[in-house]
Image (cartoon, rainbow, N blue to C red):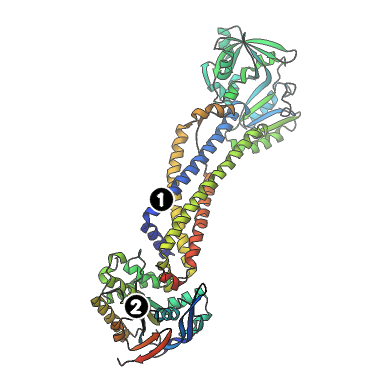
């Protein structure tokens, strides 16, 4: 994890154009932003404003048509697919709207998987995964598979998976979209606690007002451009 | 790697119906492959054994040129005793002298061409299965026979007896080419070797009676050698050639040199089994590829997730290949588990060839085939199964490995 206040993620004049046949759609148009360590940032805006596209580019899941993205100072545009995979493994954590857990693995195995890919020894891997799940109130569900859990429980496992390797930043794409209000509030409490107590940096893509309320900085996108960038006091 | 195995294994269990169907096709295909292979090996051994045990023996010593022109004019010098004792002294195998010549078998009603074989009954029983293949009467015990009949004994094949309408105790006349003339014999026994082609051609008389019939004094044309292990034939042949170098010109030939067509036919059957393998494995490959492709399409989002977590494309490729290898490996294991005891059992009881027995008999094969598998028969089909797993899994695996994470995560 980076030192508090250090720039973790930076976008410089980033654009993304999707081409389908003869149709060109500009999803992002010259977006620039910086996210520092310890921040809790929400990317908001209406559907089609480019939130998920920007999150995918910042998370190196997709490549920009133009502009540069720097992750911990490293220009990701210059890296190959295998290097990007290694970078994601070492520095990023993801939480998705649809939880996206590996259905054939238990909660513990899902969380362990990241550590396993990082080459962490089995005993240490298990200890850290159990601790992460326990911290998130999932100690009873270690050996339960995703199909046997509620949506809220699955999303908590996804958060545990995202933070267990202590990444530079956790990118969360509409994390509350599939949750009822009580479960969503509980999840947001958890994320806020992780941010405040452990300094985990969060970047949310959302149009959920509840998420925006919890964010310390809200960046509003409209038609692929940044419309506003507001910071709030904690 | 262990996590990849775990995920791959559980993915196979997740789609257990699909996995079971693919597994069943592999098991059936592989069992059929091993079954066909074992039958082919059994048939080959049956043909070789029958030919070797009836007339070819593993090795045969003749006067030089006999193989090209099998005439009684080409005789082993003397009565062959010197050669025979040299072979026995060296302990190279069981040996028996023979006088082999062409002739006619006559009854009052019919004439049939025949190969007349004069044998030393005691020695012949050590190199040939004919003395033990009698269905009626007895073998060439001249002393016992003389007590029963004034005519010398003859043993004929069942098929020849049927064609001649002859039974044990009937009189037959053997006529040989040239001035030698003819002799009357009494049917002492009727044999069934398993090959109808052999049974209608070969008749057996004592060596002394054959020498009289062909007017050849004490000559023999062949010394047949049966080895305890057929695989030793090339070494023993080499040794014999060295041993007999001092003798007047003799040739030492293996069974496959004397009957190259039989050896070629068995080789051809071996090659045919490869064509069968190729068809079975190609069908298996399409089945596996289809199942894995379906499985990959169903899991595109999951692959996107794994990519987003930092799993490299090469590891995704490996994951799908591991699934392919697990499926094929499991199918191969079960297939082997079924095929080996099945072949072992069939090897004990044999497979009756029913309608095909007559045709097989004409080609020198018996009507009951005992399938068998040799240790050397396993690596190639197992290797082909592994290659099938690799080839069948490669396409779906590449498809999964090349997915862009963002696109895969968007997949519905």
Using the image, tell me which numbered label, if any, was put on residue B287. none
Q: State the residue position of label 1.
A: B21
Q: Depth check: give the residue in front, A208 or B181.
A: A208
Q: Secondary structure at mark 1?
A: helix
Which residue is pictured at 54% across the width and 12% down the height? B168
Marks 2/1: CA–CA distance: 40 Å
Quadrant of residue A155 in the image?
bottom left
Residue B396 screen position, x and y as percent: 48, 61
Left or right: residue B143 compared with residue B183: left
Quadrant of residue B68 in the image?
top right
> Which quarter of the figure is the N terminus of chain B placed in?
bottom left
Which residue is pictured at 49% across the width and 64% down the height? B399
The residue furthest left is A182
Residue A207 screen position, x and y as percent: 33, 81
Residue B133 screen position, x and y as percent: 53, 22
Using the image, tell me which numbered label, if any, was put on residue A174. 2
- Asked if labels 2 and 1 share a chain, the reply is no
> Which quarter of the figure is the C terminus of chain B placed in?
bottom left
Residue B169 screen position, x and y as percent: 55, 9
């Amino acid at each position: 994890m980076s030192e508090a206040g250090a720039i973790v993620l930076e976008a410089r004049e980033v654009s993304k154009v999707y081409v389908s046949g003869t149709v060109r759609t500009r999803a992002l148009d010259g977006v620039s932003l910086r996210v520092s360590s310890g921040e809790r940032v929400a990317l908001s805006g209406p559907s089609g404003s480019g939130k998920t596209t920007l999150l995918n580019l910042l998370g190196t899941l997709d490549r920009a048509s133009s502009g540069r993205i720097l992750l911990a100072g490293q220009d990701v545009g210059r890296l190959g697919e295998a290097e990007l995979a290694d970078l994601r493994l070492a520095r990023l954590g993801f939480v998705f709207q649809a939880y996206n857990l590996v259905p054939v693995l238990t909660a513990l195995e899902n969380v362990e998987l990241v550590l396993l890919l990082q080459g962490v020894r089995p005993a240490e891997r298990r200890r850290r995964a159990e601790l992460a799940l326990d911290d998130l109130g999932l100690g009873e569900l270690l050996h339960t598979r995703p199909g046997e859990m509620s949506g809220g429980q699955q999303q908590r496992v996804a958060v545990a998976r995202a933070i267990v390797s202590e990444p530079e930043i956790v990118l969360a794409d509409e994390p509350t979209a599939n949750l009822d209000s009580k479960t969503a509030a509980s999840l947001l409490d958890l994320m806020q606690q992780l941010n405040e107590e452990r300094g985990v940096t969060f970047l949310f893509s959302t149009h959920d007002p509840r998420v925006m309320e919890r964010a310390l900085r809200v960046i509003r996108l409209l038609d692929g451009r940044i419309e506003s960038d507001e910071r709030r006091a904690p | 790697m262990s996590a990849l195995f775990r995920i791959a294994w559980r993915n196979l269990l997740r789609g257990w119906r699909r996995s079971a169907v693919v597994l069943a096709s592999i098991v059936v295909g592989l069992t059929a492959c091993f079954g066909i292979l074992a039958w082919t090996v059994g048939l080959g051994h049956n043909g070789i054994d029958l030919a070797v045990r009836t007339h070819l023996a593993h090795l045969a010593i003749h006067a030089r040129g006999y193989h090209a022109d099998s005439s009684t004019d080409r005789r082993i010098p003397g009565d062959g005793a010197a050669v025979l004792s040299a072979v026995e002294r060296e302990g190279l195998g069981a040996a028996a002298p023979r006088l082999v010549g062409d002739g006619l078998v006559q009854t009052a009603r019919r004439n049939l061409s025949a190969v007349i074989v004069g044998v030393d009954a005691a020695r012949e029983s050590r190199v040939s299965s004919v003395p033990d293949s009698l269905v009626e009467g007895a073998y060439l015990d001249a002393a016992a026979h003389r007590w029963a009949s004034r005519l010398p004994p003859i043993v004929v094949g069942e098929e020849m007896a049927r064609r001649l309408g002859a039974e044990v105790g009937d009189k037959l006349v053997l006529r040989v080419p040239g001035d030698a003339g003819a002799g009357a014999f009494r049917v002492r026994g009727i044999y069934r070797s398993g090959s109808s082609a052999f049974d209608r051609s070969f008749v057996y008389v004592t060596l002394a009676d054959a020498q009289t019939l062909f007017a050849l004094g004490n000559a023999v044309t062949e010394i047949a050698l049966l080895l305890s292990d057929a695989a030793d034939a090339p070494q023993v042949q080499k040794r014999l050639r060295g041993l007999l170098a001092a003798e007047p010109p003799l040739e030492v030939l293996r069974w496959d040199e004397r009957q190259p067509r039989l050896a070629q036919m068995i080789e051809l059957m071996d090659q045919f089994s490869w064509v069968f393998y190729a068809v079975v494995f190609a069908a298996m490959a399409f089945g596996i590829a289809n199942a894995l492709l379906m499985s990959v399409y169903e899991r595109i989002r999951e692959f996107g997730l794994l990519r987003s977590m930092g799993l490299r494309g090469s590891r995704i490729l490996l994951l799908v290949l591991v699934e392919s290898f697990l499926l094929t490996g499991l199918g191969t294991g079960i297939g082997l588990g079924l095929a080996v005891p099945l072949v072992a059992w069939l090897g004990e009881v044999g497979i009756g060839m029913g309608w095909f027995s007559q045709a097989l008999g004409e080609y020198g094969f018996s009507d009951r085939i005992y399938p068998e598998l040799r240790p050397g028969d396993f690596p190639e089909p197992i290797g082909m199964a592994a290659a099938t797993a690799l080839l069948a899994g490669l396409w779906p695996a590449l498809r999964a490995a090349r997915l862009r994470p963002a696109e895969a995560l968007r997949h519905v």
